[in-house]
Image: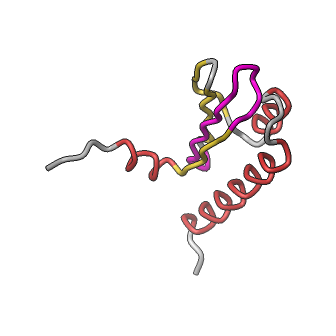
Amino acid sequence: MIGPQMVGQDFRVEMMEKVEALFDAHGGKPFADIAGDLGDWGFVQKGGDPATVVMEHGDLQLYLEIELDDVGKVHGYALLPFDEMARKQEKFRW
């Protein structure tokens, strides 16, 4: 039996593969060239600065951080599920 959690996980994995393919095809190009696609797929910009754009996909609980160079071209990215992002932000405890 496939529950809603499994279906959500399948959609999440599918979206992660889609985003990775987008960056593979457009790496080194201006962020503006891919921002529309990400928005159409449900990603919303949550913040950032001139060197980094932070986006989230609330329905699929994905966090996307895009590193930009000094002229706004994509330099790198990190794409993580919210739960993994939360684990990375936990403070180390003795």
Tell me: 10 left or right of 86.
right
Tell me: 58 left or right of 21.
left
Instruction: Name the image quarter holding residue 73.
Output: top right
Q: Residue at x 57, y 23 (%)?
A: 47
The magenta stretch spans which residues?
Answer: 59-75
Q: Residue at x 79, y 53 (%)?
A: 21
Q: Nearer the viewer, residue 34 or 15?
A: 34
Tell me, yes or no, whether the highlighted magenta stretch contains residue 10: no
Q: Measured from the top left, where is residue 83 in percent x and y?
A: 45, 51
Tell me, yes or no, whether the highlighted magenta stretch contains residue 65: yes
Q: Nearer the viewer, residue 49 or 86?
A: 49
Q: Measured from the top left, where is residue 68 in percent x and y?
A: 68, 28
Q: How is the image coloured?
A: secondary structure
Q: Measured from the top left, where is residue 11 in percent x and y?
A: 68, 59
Q: Nearer the viewer, residue 30 or 22?
A: 30
Q: Nearer the viewer, residue 7 or 81?
A: 81
Q: Quadrant of the N terminus?
A: bottom right
Check the image and name the residue furthest to the bottom: 1
